[in-house]
Every structure is written in structure tokens, then in C-alpha cells.
Amino acid sequence: MTKFFISCALPYANGPCHLGHLRSTYIPADIFARFNRMNGNDVLLVCATDEHGTPIAVKADNEGKKPIEIATRYHRRIIKDLEMCDISIDNFSRTTSKTHYKIAQNFFLDLYSKNLIYEKKIKQLYCDYCSKFLPDRYVEGICRFCNSPGARGDQCEVCGRHLDVEDLLEPKCLACGKTPVIKESKHYFFRLSKFQGKVENYVYGNPNLGDNVRNYLKNWLKDGLKDWILSRDMDWGIPIPLKGSQGKIIYVWVEALIGYISSATEWSKKTGISWREYWDDTVLHFIGKDIIYHHGIFWPAMLEGYGCKNPDNIIAGEYLSLEGRKMSTSQGWVIWVKDFVENFDSDLLRYYLTVTAPLNKDMDFSWDDFKRRVNDELADVLGNFLHRTFTFTNKFFDGKVPKLFNLTEEDKKFKSLIENLPYEVADSISNFKFRDGLVNILKIAKEGNKYFDHQKPWKSVKDDYEKASNCLYLSNQLSKVLAINLKPYLPNKSIKILDILNLEDTNDWNNSKIFLEVGHDIKEAKPLFRKIEDEKINKEKEKLYNFEKKSQNNEKLKENNIMDIISIDDFVKLDLRIGKVLEAGKIKGSEKLLKLKIDIKEKEMQVVAGLGLKYSPEQLINRKVTVLVNLKPANLFGVKSEGMVLATADSTEIIKPDGSKIGEKVM
């Protein structure tokens, strides 16, 4: 028996799951895990939501919420997405758990104590207007290497290169839009360069790694590994557990990888079983192509430094495009899991995302091709064979598996195909060739239909009873094999087929090698795969293209500084009042933000305003201001803000309400 420690790449908690996540990572991992459980192996399948980093912090700023609120919202949504697709994860955690914080900090301290982490001052982009350094996605510019716009502060999505300060041309702060300056900041670095030889041995000496993974990592290794920055200047994340490191957190990509171990640790606490037993045997990481270098270079080096065994294999799924184009969540060119499963059986999705292309090749999702495969392959081939078998068994043999008489050569050939299928599918799944296994299943279902057509049991039952009996005997045996061999791929349909066969759900792969006994009762046939109508697919395509068009229009409005037109009904919802500043003070950690106490006659309210670079607190005391008083409260730098002071965007000049009375409403 093998013990498998299987992990799925941690989904980032700033949005729900889309089909690309399922195709590259979660469905392949689930197929492999289910198959091995059925073969008596002990499997621990873990995952968690990745909840730190700048994208969540930026989204929280934009929505006036705390980052943990954003992360919690999508943590819950992602769990539902995976549950709807029957991903059989043993423990699903989150990187904001106390367990994860403790393990990540201890991991950091261990490397630090071994002199594998050192301090170094570096140049970094700093926004004077926002009074903070700009990590990762708080800044964008043009990539120096490929001239692509929209490059982030640490990486270009187009060419995949890591970017230093000088590599980002025309940088802009995403919070305020102003140009940042370069300043020095102390950071912590991991001696990645020390592990060049170790990582090369792992990449070139590991026969398990797929060619797509090894070829991708070669490009990194040939340039020579450079020390890796492990810290960021921001509040949202796991604090670095060293004196003098206030305001610095562990880089999200360092601690997110440790999330595999912290999730497994939580599982161990619940079950009393050590996760180390699984790690010491066989470790498999299922990931997407875009994070190969994290798992194939950074992670092995970190584990070597810590003194822990490296993963036995990294299985990386290639990209999923949509209707011939790259998916884009910002442009609305995406299909979310929730939207799909609300309209189609999740097993249909699992089938299509597996059978269309090998995992190590890019794949395109096409609504028309999805319909074709469901109709032509699942309904007309697999569903047709099963339905004919069960229908004729009930019609001609009283719903019982008939006897087997002297076999013809055609019978023997068909019987051999049935007996070999469990071994062929098992070999494919064991070698991560998930598509091949599913193609074999469909292939023998086609052979089943051919065999059925040749034997003509509806005719031969009258003039050659033994021929008809053999046909239905073998067809029922194949139905059982199909039901069990389909379980890793289509768990729900597998159960339904087993139910018609009057068999209990089984987790024993070897059960597919045992034939049904003569006289075994078969239930009435039920529709297993219904055809998809053109109208339903056309609606989905229309929805996709309309949503994309709406998203693009919104982007054009932003680019051209065109405001959305609002109605008078929208305007009257704004409660604008004249107020008087009673108190004003600076907010610790920000040069821009001031905390104001404002009297609007009906009450006193607290407002955080970005006026600090234009006005001193003393200049604002007793000054009249215009305040939006019915704005949803937000927390800025940990201070509650209950409204907004109106000022001009560029000069930050307060709009003067001279002559108006305190509490007077602006119409």
C-alpha cells in the first residue's frame, strides 16, 4: 500500500473558481485521488485558500472593507465551487488560520537560524502621496523586457519575468495614480543561489517530472538562481517574527507554499493521524502551468534548507482558453464554476475538461464542442449502450443477467476487451494520462454498440436464443466495468449506473474485474445522459459575449475618463451636508490621511480624509466642509470613516461652502 500526500494549488481568495482552475488542478487531482483510494492506497488530499498578498488588500481598499472580509467571502465561495464539482478534498483550510501563521513563522525562523535568510537594503518604489512602499500589485507600469503595459511591481504577466525597480518603466501607484519615487528599504532574502546544484539534481535527476515541467524549469536554471526576496512592506500578511521587522510580512509566495503542510497539520489534529507518514512516502503537487517555477525551484530549495523531503512529482496542467481566446476575468471573458454547474451536470464538465486534451497540452473550451461531445459521445455512445443493455435485459430476460453459452470468436474478442479495460484505465491514471483512460472507456463503449448491432438481440432472441443470451450477458458485464471505471471521472453518473445494475456504490477498483452472476437482477433503464439542445448553448454563448461587451464598455469609460450617466433618482440618494471640523489629527503611518471629527448639527461623525499633504490639522479646525454623510462606513489604516469630505481630485482643494449653515443639506 502506498501513502499519497496530494496537494492542489491554493486558489487565491480574491475571486471564485473558473473552469481553468478545475481543468489544470482540481479535477486531475481528484481523479488520481479517487482512483488510488479505490485501489487500496491511503490518500491525503489537502488544499486551502491563499488569503494574503496585495490583490486582496487592493480589493479591500476599493470596497472599503478589511482584507479578511474579502478573503472570507471568497473562501466560502471557493469551497462551494469545489463541492459542486465533487472534488474529494480531505482537508480544506485557509492561510489566515492560527495553525498556518505559527507553522509559517517557525519555518522562516528555522531558515534564518541556519543563515539561509539574510538582511539587505534594496531600492523600492515609494508613493509619497499614499505614504507607503508599493509592493506587487499596488504599482503597474511597462515591462522593460517585452514592452508590455500593465506589468506588476514584481512580475510581467506577458513574458513571465520577475521585475526589479528599474525594470518597471513609467510606474504608477494604483491607489492614487501618481508616479512613485525610489527609496531604500530593508528586506529579507533567501539564499536561493546556494541551492543551484540541489535544484538541478531535483529537476534533471527526477524521472517522475513531466517534460512540460522540466522544460519550463530549464530556462530558469540556465540563467543561474538568484537570491529570493522573502519580505514585503505592508500590513496584510504574516508578520516576520524578528525584532526590528515591524511593518514587514513574509512574502505571500513563501508562506502560501507552506499552506500544504499547515492544512495537513490541521487534518492530523482532527484525525490523530500523522501527515508525515504520507509525506515520507509519496508527495504529489497538482498545479497550473503559471506556478511551475514556484513549485519546481523555490519550494524544493526551501524544503532542502529546512531538511524536508522534496515532492516526488509536480503535475502541471496547461492553459485553458475560451472560444479560441485567452480567458480574462477583467474583460468578462470567463466561465465561472457556479454559473456552469447551475445549468449543467458537473459530471459533464468533468468529462469535457478531461477528454478534450491531455493535461500537458493547452486546451480550448468551446460551447459548441462541449455540446457535440456530450451529445455524440456521452449520449449517443456511452448512454446508448447502457440504455440498450438494460432495456433489452428487462424486455427479453425478465430483468436478470442471462446465461452464458458457447462463445463465438466475436464473443471471445468482446469478452477480452471487457476483462482488459480495468487494467488499461488503471495504467493510464497511474501515469497521469487521464485523458487516455477516459478515451479507452469511450472506445470500448463504441465497441459495445458495434457488438450489440452485430448480435441483434431483438431479433436473435427469437431464432438464436443463445446468441442473444451471450450478447446481454457480456453487455451487462461491460456495464458493470464501465460503472466502476468511470467513478474517478464521473462520480455521480457512476453511482446511477451502479444503482440500475442493482449494486451498491463501491470503492473497490478490483470489483470491476469480477463478473455479475447469472440471474442477478437489473433494474429498469433510466436516462443517464440527455442531449443538450442548440437553444441552451446559444443562450450561454450570448450571455458570454454580452458580458464581455459590457465589461469592455466599462473599461473604455474608465480609460477615457467618461463618467457613467446617472439618473436624478441616483443623485438624490446622496445625502450631502454642510459640516464644521471640530477636531483634526494625523493618522499614524500615513502622511496623507487625517482623522476629522465633524459636526453636521444632527450628530458628530468621524471621517478619514486624504487632505494631509494639502492641509495641516490646525488649518482645518473650525473650517466648514461639505460632507457625504450616508456613505457606507469603511476602515482606513485601522480607523473607522463614516463619510467623505468633498475636495477636488488633482489639487485636493476643499470645496468651500461659505455662507451655508451647519447641517444644511446640499441640493
Image: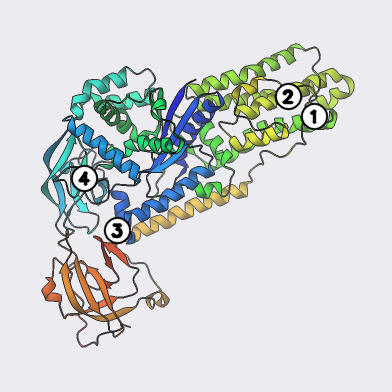
Question: Mark 4 — residue?
Answer: 232
Question: Mark 1 — residue?
Answer: 393
Q: Residues within 10 Å of mark 2 (few under 14, many from 20)?
A: many
Q: Nearer the viewer, mark 4 or mark 2?
A: 4
Q: Earlier in the sequence, mark 1 or mark 4?
A: 4
Q: Earlier in the sequence, mark 1 or mark 3?
A: 3
**Kind of residue at disc 1:** Thr
Residue 233 image point, x, y percent: 19, 48
Question: Mark 3 — residue?
Answer: 61
Distance between the Cα atoms at labels 2 and 3? 61 Å
Q: Nearer the viewer, mark 1 or mark 4?
A: 4
**CB atoms of marks 1 and 2 within 8 Å:** yes
Classify mark 2: helix, strand or loop: helix
Q: Nearer the viewer, mark 2 or mark 3?
A: 3
Question: Mark 2 — residue?
Answer: 475
Residue drawn at (56%, 50%) of the image: 342
Residue 200 or 46: which is nearer the viewer?
46
**Kind of residue at disc 4:** Arg
In the rendered image, the vertical position of residue 210 relative to residue 662, given as above or below: above
**CB atoms of marks 4 and 2 within 8 Å:** no
